[in-house]
Every structure is written in structure tokens, then in C-alpha cells.
Image: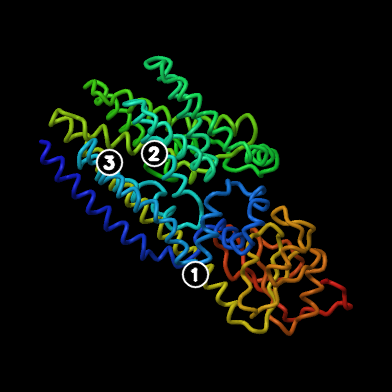
Amino acid sequence: MEANKNTIGQVFFALSILMLIYMLISPLNQVLSNISEFFTLTLINFPMSDLLHILGGETNPPLYFLLLKAMSKLTSDFAILKVFSAIPYAIILILSTLKLRRDYGWLTAGLFAFALAVMSEFLITYSLLRPYSWAMLFTLLAFIFFKDIIANADKKSFVLFTVFSILASYTHYYGLIATIILYLILLFHILTYDKDKIKYWGISLVAAIVLYAPWIPTLIKLLGSMNPMGKLTSDSIVQSLAHFAYSGDTLLSAITLIVFIAILAVYLKEKDNDTQFVLYGTIAYFATIAVVFLISIILKPILLTTGLVLASAILWLIISIMIGKIKSKRTFLISLALICLVLISGIGTMIAASNDAYQSGLKQNEALDEILKDNNSITIITNPGLAMYYLDFDGATDMYCVSQDYIYGENINRLHEIFDFKTVDKDNITSLARNNTGKNIYLISWGNPDVDLNVTKVSNELGTTISKVNTTGLAYDEYDEYYY
């Protein structure tokens, strides 16, 4: 049966290589499919010296953005920059080949690699100008060296666990939550089974705290100032718990949870030598989600389902290990069949989600191209926080933004030094339009534009609305000092 397992695993791995090739040429790399990508592109236009200050107002730690800023020195083409987010998957393939295959065999390595390409929101994260894929990689590596600590408790494993825990925490706050939970589980394990190693755990913890300390004040400030995200409902709770497989389908999520519990129960009956690690990984996944729920209840909603891909990678490693370890041929075939059904339905969900993301991004790109080709136009960003300043449209349009004193923690004058735009008081947007009826006037807004003008929607994608003002019959007001 082992030979058959290896063959199945090799098929999965071959498919994973094809998925990596697809990621590099994916149509998703040609569009911006998430509104937060606009912020990323705006951010990397700032000098490196400004980034840490500006990122104090972001909902993610700074590491990914600093890395992308360094990449942007080589190219400003966002399609190429997007490929940077696929690099973690290439590293996962190498990891699967060199380490997981050696420790667990081809089936575990291949199934794990394939699942991390096609399930949940994994594929989309590999094409986003956002930190998810890198945070997932660092969290996964921390978990793998967590396993090595349990198995060997050597100094090298402690050092690598510490390093990747810090990197995960500096890349995404969900990575911080996951690594804190891993530290707590590791403490339990050491106190229970290997008390002599408690000093290494203590040194690792102190090093992590000291190295993360410079960012802790920013994190505390952020918790007090950030806008609520993702309210808890019965649907969001079920979907979050099964986010390792699906995104946005409550029924499929519930069925998948039942399948996972069934496979876990079957595996635990066999009392394998990796049982402890499997239980720790299961706890790490569900505890990470539970902490997000707890913070959402006690402080404010912080549920960001895309961020759950970090912990989802841990659970897929656990699932892949369990499938590879089942010894009974009949039980193995049933378990593999159930996982394949989950994979097939997940692939269908993934294709639909990726297509929706691409179509939304394409429609918005087309609307932005309309502005780019219009040399007789004015474009107004009606919400100061809308992160689209980098859209200078090669000077094709006169750019305006609703005036305010600060943006991203920076004085608005600093923003003027980097981006070519003027400011306009919100109350004077109508006057600006009425005094420029000879031009095409576009509004970019969060949701519907809150202006006293007759507009036609050009695009309504990714949480933003691009509208065109109907200037026919628009009366001129007395000239107003609307910009400065």
C-alpha cells in the first residue's frame, strides 16, 4: 500500500507544480483584485524612511511592506510585484520535497502542497499585494520547527522556531496570535514531558518579546483606533472554523468540519507516534480562531477571514500527516476519498472565487483606463482614506482629494511632495464641478459618493465606486476658492 500512497502523492505534487506555474502567469496578476492593494501601491511610493511611521496606522505589521518596497527598487510594474506573493508557495514546494517527503513520505508532501494551492483563499493570496502568503509561510515554518522541538528539543530547532515566530508576528497580526498559541502549547509540552528544556523556552520567549517590543506600542495604539471588521454571526463562526477548506459557504463548511472530525477520530484510534503533534496542530488552528473570536467579543470585531489562511496551513499539514499515516487499507481509502471530495468541491469554490476577483478587478481596471485615456478630465477622491493616491494617471487628469490635515499619519503636505494632486473641501466639490463643466469629472468613493451631483456609475467594484458627473445643464455657481 505504501507504493500506492507514494504514487498518489507524486500525482498531487505534479499538480502542485502546475499550480505554481499557473500562479506565475495567472490573469489575477494583471488586475488589482483587492481594495487594500491600492494602499500597498501607494505605500511603496514613499521613501523607506517614512514607511514605519505610516504603517503605524495600517492593520498589518511592517515586514512585508518593507520587503515589497525593496522589490519596487527593481521594478514598479505591479504585475511583477504580485509574483512576489507567489514565492512563498515555491518555498512550500521545496519544503514539501526536502523535509515533508523525508519525514512522512510522498503522500503527505504531495497532498499538503496541492491543498495549499487550491483550497480556501490560498490561490488568491498568492496573487495579492498583501502580506498573507508570506505570513502563512513564516507561521508554517514556525510550526514545523515547533514539531522538531517536540521531537528533539535541540538548540537549533529553538533558534529557528524563534526566528520564524518573530517573522510571522512582524508580517501579520494573526501570525502573532498563532505564534503566541504555539509558545503556550510548547510550554505545556515542556512542563509535562521535558522540564529540563524550560530554560530554552524561556530564552526563546524573551528573545521574541525583546525583538517585537519596538512594535508593541503601535499594536496597542492600533487596537484602540482601528475600525471594526467582520462581525461575528452564526454563519461567520462556522465558515471561520472551516476556513482551511472553504470561504463563504456555511453548508460546505459544516460538512467539512464533520469530515475532519471523522478523520481525526479514525487516526487517533491508531495511536501513531505523531499523535501528540497532530493534536497540538489541531489545537493551534482552532485556538487561533477562538482568540480572534474572543478579541472580537471583548474589544472590537477583528475577524478577517483571509487572515485565517495562516492557521489553515497548519491544519492542512495535520490532515496530510493523518491521511499518510492511516494503516488500514479500507480506512485509508475511505478517508482519502472524503478528502478528495473536499478537494474537488474546494477547487470549484476556488475557481468561482478567483473568477469573481478577476472580473471585479478587470471592471475596475477598465474604468480607471477610461480616466487614463481622458485628457480633458478631473478626478476627485471623495474619501480621504481611500488609498489611491498613486493613481496619477501619467498626468492625464487633474487629481483632487477631499482635504484633511493628515493621511496615514503623515502631514498632508508630505503627501503632496510625493503625489501630484490638489485638495478640495468636501463642501466645495459641487462648486468645483460647476466651474469645470467643459471637462469630464470622475469621482472615486467608498460606496456611493456623498455629493450633491447627478452622477452615473462607471464601476462599482472592490468596495469602491467610480462615477462620472453628468455636467449637462449643470449651472455655474459664483466662483469659489475650492482648491489651494
Q: Residue furthest right?
A: 478
Give the residue displayed 68% in from the left and 80% down from the top.
377
**Amino acid type at image mark 2:** Ser
Camera-near label (1 vs 3) is 3
Measured as percent of width and height from the top left, residue 350 is found at 37, 52
Q: Amino acid at mark 3?
A: Lys
x%, y% of residue 300? 64, 36
- Corner quadrant of residue 182: top left
The residue sitting at the front extreme is: 155
Q: Earlier in the sequence, mark 2 or mark 3?
A: 3
Vertical relation: 187 (above or below) 141? above
Is 60 left or right of 472, judged from the image as shown?
Answer: left
Query: Is 110 in front, or is 452?
Result: 110
- Name the residue rendered at 19%, 34% in the picture: 334
Q: Is residue 65 above or below residue 76?
A: above
* Residue ID for mark 1: 77
Closer to the camera: disc 1 or disc 2? 1
In the rendered image, the quadrant that contains the N terminus is: top left
Q: Quadrant of the C terminus?
A: bottom right
In whole angstroms, how far apart are the C-alphas of marks 1 and 3?
Answer: 34 Å
| Camera-nearest residue between 249 and 162 | 162
Q: Which amino acid, mark 1?
A: Asp
- Residue pointed to by mark 2: 253
Q: Secondary structure at mark 1?
A: loop
> Which SS class for mark 3?
helix
Residue nearest the viewer, comparing 86 with 31: 86
